[in-house]
Amino acid sequence: MIKVYKVKIGEKVYEVEVESVTEINGTISTPTPTSTPAPAVAPATPGNGTKVEAPMQGMVVSIDVIPGTRVKAGDTLLVLEAMKMENPIVAPVDGIVESISVNKGDTVDGGAIIATIA
């Protein structure tokens, strides 16, 4: 089973995935997954949509959507540059972009709200 954790080192926040494993007689095996329920997402109401946070500190190098854009989970909302790497920030849920809270060229802190999806 894979769990996602946020780890803060200094002022930087990293998102890591951890998978549980079992060692039996010197052999490492991963548990066989059973059906995994979909994560619960509260229904969005105007002004109370899904908040998208910056996973790390970085500079906004491009914004791919505008308010009113319909997105699917996994669609790129914007790109953050951190440590000379460009990191696409994707929509966590299907919906309509309600707001973008940053501009191209802005520097954002990890955990800052960068967009809202209704």
Image (tube, grey):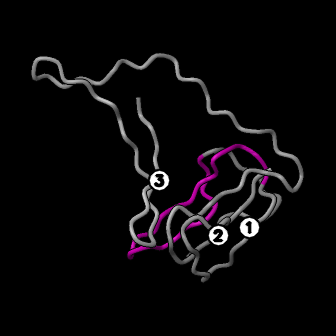
**Dot placed on the residue nearer the N-terminal end, 2 or 3:** 3
Coordinates of residue 94 in the picture (x, y in percent): 71, 43
Q: Which residue is mark 2?
A: 63
* Residue range (magenta): 74-96
**Dot placed on the residue nearer the N-terminal end, 3 or 1:** 3
Q: Are marks 2 and 1 in contact (CB under 8 Å)?
A: yes
Label 1 crowd (10 A; few <14 / some 14-19 / many >=20): some
Q: Is residue 66 left or right of residue 110?
A: right
Q: CA distance from mark 2 to mark 1?
A: 9 Å
Seen at 74% across and 67% down, the residue is 100
Q: Which residue is mark 1?
A: 100
Residue nearest the observer in this picture, 92 or 9:
9
Q: CA distance from mark 3 to mark 1?
A: 23 Å
Q: Which residue is mark 3?
A: 6
Coordinates of residue 30 in the picture (x, y in percent): 29, 24
Label 3 crowd (10 A; few <14 / some 14-19 / many >=20): few
Label 2 crowd (10 A; few <14 / some 14-19 / many >=20): some
